Amino acid sequence: RKHVIIEAHTDVLKEMRRRGWHERPGVSVLSGRWQDVVPSLSGAFDAIFFDTWEESYADLRAFLRHLPRLLNARGRFSFFNGFASFDIFYHSVCCRIAQDDLRDIGLDCGFLPIEVPHLGEEVWRSVARKYWQFGTYYLPIASTSLPPGPSVDDRGEADVAVNGCRVL
């Protein structure tokens, strides 16, 4: 097993080094912007997570072009789903656009709802901008192996759609 991390921020890289990430078995920390590093990557990854913090949707869309080359046949993809975190309607529109873009490259995308506890204003005091404001976070999970249409998971709960977005 191998874990590849691409990180551009020097402060984060320093903290990762301090915590020993660079020495962990099977971990490769690549310093640089994803735009510069990803084109040189090869191999079939089981899973890829893209952190969209400080990235635009256009950046995510540009990254998606690399997925068919990087994911193995049963690989999964996810990303920080923080687009339009100020309005649930616009957020759901972004979810639908992501689903369409992922479908265009052969990936089905569902959203796993995760309840977010109320954090209180003190948590956000030193943060320049709240990056999440809703009571539920919708974790995108994309793969080529999701079953089509509604299904029942191992908890006996059925898939549902919210504003046209499939929720697992």
Image: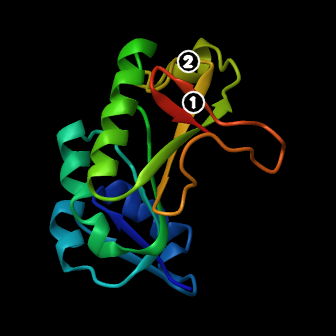
Element on which disc 2 rests? loop
Vertical relation: 45 (above or below) 112: below
Q: Which residue is mark 1?
A: 137
Count of numbered labels shown in the rendering: 2
User: At 52% across and 73% down in the image, what residue appears?
Assistant: 21
Write down the residue under mark 2. 134
User: Which residue is painted at 71% across and 23% down in the image?
Assistant: 117
Instruction: For residue 56, say whether it is visible.
Output: no
Quarter assignment of residue 114: top right
Q: Nearer the viewer, residue 165 or 7?
A: 165
The answer to whether residue 2 is above or below residue 162 is: below
Residue 3, image x, y percentages: 50, 76
Labelled pair 2, 1 in contact (Cβ < 8 Å): yes
Give the camera-side residue of 44 and 24.
44
Protein image colouring: rainbow
Quarter of the image holding residue 85? top left
Nearer-the-camera pick, 63 or 164:
164
In the displayed structure, does residue 59 sit left or right of residue 137? left
Under mark 2, the amino acid is Phe
The amino acid type, in three-letter code, at marker 1 is: Tyr
Q: What x and y, as percent, mark residue 45?
A: 43, 76
The structure residue drawn at horizontal position 35% and vertical position 23%, both measured from the top left corner, is: 93
The quarter of the image holding the N terminus is: bottom right
Q: Secondary structure at mark 1?
A: strand
Instruction: Count residues near mark 2 (Cα–Cα under 10 Å), then give few for <14, some for 14-19, many for 20+.
Output: some
The residue located at (41%, 13%) in the rendering is 89
